[in-house]
Amino acid sequence: MHFIKNPSNDIIDQLVLSFANLTNSAKAIRFTALKEKDEYEAFAPSYGNSLSEQTSDPARIAILNKITKIFRPAKNEEPLLSGMLCASDELVKKINIFNRSKEEFIYFVSKTQRYAEKSLRENSGRFISNLMKKEVKSHFDHDIFDLQTLEQISCNQIDLMSCRRKIKVLPKNLRSFSWTWSSKHRSIQKISKSQALQLASKLDGDLKDSALQILSACPDEAFAKVKPLKEQLRANYVYFDNNLPIQKSTPVSGVVIAPQKKLPTLVWREPPSSTKKPNVRLQRPTTIEETPILPELKIHRYL
């Protein structure tokens, strides 16, 4: 594939227009969700300390902010972990349009990166945000964005992670929904001695010399590289199809949509890291030494 240093005008135009579609579809969601707030319930478990707070109009606003999030939040902002919004068929349709608009925008983000020779490892959010600011300011008719969006483009960085994240719409006739957290707290990757030496060679100064010496003196031919995992939010839910209960489990990221007026039976659990109770669970036999041979690289020996 042939790469050029500057994205073509056509690609930039498509990028900006796809972002306009994204922001417009987000506004359409907010308008409809606020219009039907008296009929369709909402629940934000981490908003306030009582059910009345968690189902209040301000909680609904927090849910909508989470759903339609396109720009990175301010440093002092605490976005919701999750939530549920009941929705009409009209609102579900607009959420599906929003999800497709996300796909379209991310497609042109990737295309712009390729033509600009920007590595996916670089801060693509900053690159796209700066490009958008420049193009909107100098070339585009400002009528495609309202004043609030123009100000956000000017002052804030686009949150590409949020733009990639689809809003999950649950099945109809939802009866129960419970949030839970995955218990796996680390992943273990088997690496060869040469791979371990390669990682050690990238350290600096005395750490590098010490790590290379330890590995060279170790007779092992394979090591375990441990990677801590963030707590993953999941959900178990039950819905009815042809009067038959169906149980499902799914990863959850952000707010989920229930296509009905009333909330199902809900169970929310706080993340284990936020509770002071010890995590009581059956300890499985481990295959690696608990103390790493190279703490700075999280490399362990196998037992």
Image (cartoon, helix red, strand yellow):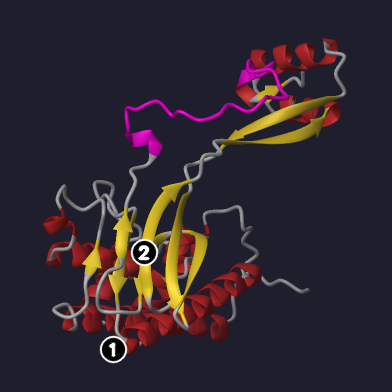
Residue 97 position in % (x across, y down): 42, 85
Establish if 291 lies above or below 170.
above
Task: Determine which residue is flagged by label 2.
Answer: 176
Residue 280 seen: yes
Is 187 situated left or right of 274 in this image?
right
Secondary structure beneath label 1: helix
Q: Earlier in the sequence, mark 1 or mark 2?
A: 1
Q: Which residue is mark 1?
A: 143
Amino acid, disc 2: Ser
- Mark 2 neighbour density, 10 Å: few (under 14) some (14–19) many (20 or more): some
Q: Position of residue 128 (x, y in %)?
A: 48, 66
- What residue is rendered at 30% in x and 62% in y? 265
- Residue closer to the observer: 104 or 303: 303
Which class describes the residues within 10 Å of circle 1: few (<14), some (14-19), or many (20+)?
Answer: few
**Front residue (pair 233, 200):** 233
Number of residue marks: 2
Say left or right for 185 vs 176: right
Quadrant where the image shows the N terminus: bottom right
| Residue 70, visible in the rendered structure | no
Quadrant assignment, res 31: bottom left
Does residue 83 appear left or right of residue 201 in this picture?
left
The overriding secondary structure of the stretch rendered in magenta is: loop
| Residue 240 occupies quadrant | bottom left
Residue at 67% across, 18% down: 294
The segment highlighted magenta reads 272-295
Name above or below for residue 93 compared with residue 154.
below
Between residues 57 and 134, which one lies in front from this camera angle? 57
User: Does the magenta portion include 13?
Assistant: no
Above or below residue 150? Residue 21 is: below
Return the x and y of residue 39 as percentages of the image width and height: 17, 81
- Figure quadrant of the C terminus: top right
Q: CA distance from mark 1 to mark 2?
A: 45 Å
